[in-house]
Amino acid sequence: MSDKALRVYTGSTSIITGGASGIGRALGEEIARRGGYVVLADLQIKLAEEVAQEIHSNGGKADAYELDVTDFSAVDNLLRKIVEQTGRLDFMFNNAGISIYGDASLHRIEDWIRIINVNLLGVVNGVQVAYQIMLRQKFGHIINTASMAGLVVGSGSPSYTTTKHAIIGLSKTLRAEAKLSGVRVSVLCPSFVRTPILEGGKYGKILMSVTPEKQREIWEKLKIQPMNANTYAVKALSAIEKKQGYYHNSILVENNLVD
């Protein structure tokens, strides 16, 4: 591996799962603006390719790859391919995720299996491969996307909340272990950020009879104003650069940084 030190962010190599939209897209665009090369890995390959092309048009470096994060072999092959091409992996953003909204009584076992496979196993797959690469490099930073739902509990999304609590547990444990080897670990805990997942997303589900329009009405009544994804990305990357373990935005504690 070349240059055995983490590059932040100029000259870095970053892989972002779920990089075609939402927070993943915003992270990719911002890292590219800061001089890094980004790999946008997503099931929505056409959308990812459009984002990569837009980054290129703005003078940045990006490529798009189709990826199912639940497929360990696919994750392993992609990461090894990128490292072979670039000689390094500075940042691994395990960001892909889905939402399933609805009370536990409305969930089927298939819903639980699907969200656990994507939200938890998808992160585990990324960690499993990236961590070994970074240990050999003796540098690197793994960033897992959880949610404020991983820090607090509420009704209406038990499966989503379960997976996000698990991601925080994984990240805290790995952060303590990895620190001894020079590898960094952080977890993002976004609250209300304006992304497709707020309205179910392409691969998520809403089990209740609530339309996206009705959801927006509820937010307005509660005076909830979701943060722009690009704003969130700028703040999150700044927190990551400062080696902070957590970054969350909250409607109660505005833009709070928690170490």
Image: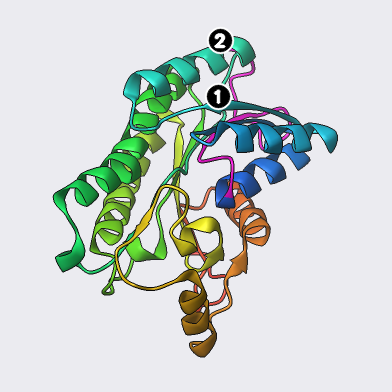
Q: Residue at x 57, y 51 (%)?
A: 23
Residue 252 appears in the figure: no
Quarter of the image where one finds residue 206: bottom left
Task: Name the side, left or right, on which 7 lies relative to 55.
Answer: left
Secondary structure mostly taken by the magenta-highlighted segment of the chain:
loop
| Residues drawn in magenta | 1-21
Q: Is residue 15 magenta?
A: yes
Q: Nearer the viewer, residue 136 or 32?
A: 32
Residue occupied by mark 2: 84
Q: Whole-percent x and y of residue 224?
A: 53, 80
Q: Secondary structure at mark 1?
A: loop
Compared to residue 220, the image places residue 131 above or below, namely: above
Residue occupied by mark 1: 89
Q: Is residue 56 magenta?
A: no
Which amino acid does the dot numbered 2 rest on?
Glu
Q: Secondary structure at mark 2?
A: helix
